[in-house]
Image: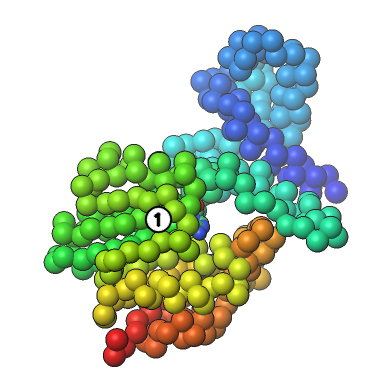
Amino acid sequence: MNKTLNEFYRAGFISTAISEGIYDVLSNGPESIEDMQRNIGTGIDKEGLKAWLDLGVAIGELDKKNGGYSIKSSFSKKILKPANDTWKAFFQARVEIFYDYIKNTPALLKQNKKFDFSHSYGELFAKSSRTVEPLLIDVVDKIIPSNGACRLLEAGCGSGIYIKRACDRNPNLTVIGLELQKPVADFARENTIIWQINNRVTIEHIDVRHFQSDNQFNIVTFFNLIYYFPEDERTELLRNLGNLLSPGGTLILTTLCPANDPSIQLMNLWSSMTDGFGPLPTPDNVCDQLYDAGFNEIQFEKLIPAFYLFKARKSGY
Ligand SMILES: C[S@@+](CC[C@H](N)C(=O)[O-])C[C@H]1O[C@@H](n2cnc3c(N)ncnc32)[C@H](O)[C@@H]1O
């Protein structure tokens, strides 16, 4: 029992030490309680803070020598390295968001309710979804032609990182990125300025379901987004995306698919239990919905276990 509970305490302790800035303070070396009080915020109760830090010592996360606290565990030291920022967000998302789903799903089900999609989690989600970035960067490199005029529409563009990669690849590419969450759309727009691609990229703060355009696109990308929609709305959405493609254009879709793996099942629990979203689709589900949406050339491949890439076109169109 101790082994299981200690891991549980550790995960909560580490995530909170990150989100409350305590590890930022401790990263500078051993700190006394008084230093910590000064650095974390005025008026912090000394006994409470000491009790919290001593718990950290007892579970092996912190060291305490000569009254000074420092970070001890190699896991915490590794996750705090800037190169591991994405995994830090991945970890925090599991503790701060997904744990709520593990704990409260049965109670909500009994009340016939689901979780609200909390927009405040946008940043944590955007950061943690970058764990698949190396794979998607490869996908972008394969699908974007390196020259010639080309119009790209990216649905659910997040930080805009794939738009950047596409623009780096083709100097004649123009892009519209759609993003539902305003803070995320603003972040993507600021990024386009920093990356100096704002002259050929427009970021729209809009629900992809409401997007209309007189222009058509050679490529539409729909990365890791299909489970943000209920199952019975997906075919119509795919049909609308198909109507935005120019003749011969391609829809590129990536998604997690169900697998008997804790991380994947947690994502499936999150998408199944968030209001307005739906379960992770099986590869067959996606193919069937693409056919029903009017696509008749469909290819798919497994990029890594449980993560699939689909390419869909309408031939003779
Ligand atoms: C999992 S993230 C994926 C971000 C990026 N495409 C990636 O793969 O890293 C999904 C993004 O799509 C946005 N999104 C969700 N539903 C949307 C909708 N209906 N219309 C536009 N964007 C949406 C979310 O706000 C989030 O930023």
Q: Amino acid at mark 1?
A: Leu
Mark 1, secondary structure of its residue:
strand
Residue 193: name its quadrant: top left
Tell me the residue at 35%/68% (across/down). 220
Q: In the image, is 157 to the left or to the right of 7?
A: left
Question: How many residues crowd around disc 1 within 10 Å: few (fewer than 14), some, or many (20 or more)?
Answer: many
Q: Position of residue 177 (x, y in %)?
A: 35, 55
Side of 194 relative to 206 (left or right): left
Q: Is the residue 316 above or below the residue 33 in the image?
A: below
Compared across the picture, whether 278 is left or right of 89 comes to right
What colouring method underlies this structural image? rainbow
Mark 1: C-beta under 8 Å from nearest atom of ligand 1: yes
Look at the image and tell me in which quarter the C terminus lies: bottom left
Q: Position of residue 277 (x, y in %)?
A: 61, 63
Residue pictured at 44% horizontal, 57% vertical:
156
Q: Is residue 94 visible?
A: no
Q: Measuring from the top left, give residue 35's x and y in whole percent.
A: 61, 11
In percent of width and height, residue 142 lies at 28, 69
Q: Residue at x 66, y 71 (%)?
A: 260
Mark 1, residue position: 178
What residue is shown at x 48% (from left), y 71% (from top)? Answer: 237
Q: How many marks on residues? A: 1
Residue 236 seen in the current view: yes
Viewer-nearest residue: 231 or 41: 231
Q: In the displayed image of the protein, which residue is found farthest to the bottom?
A: 316
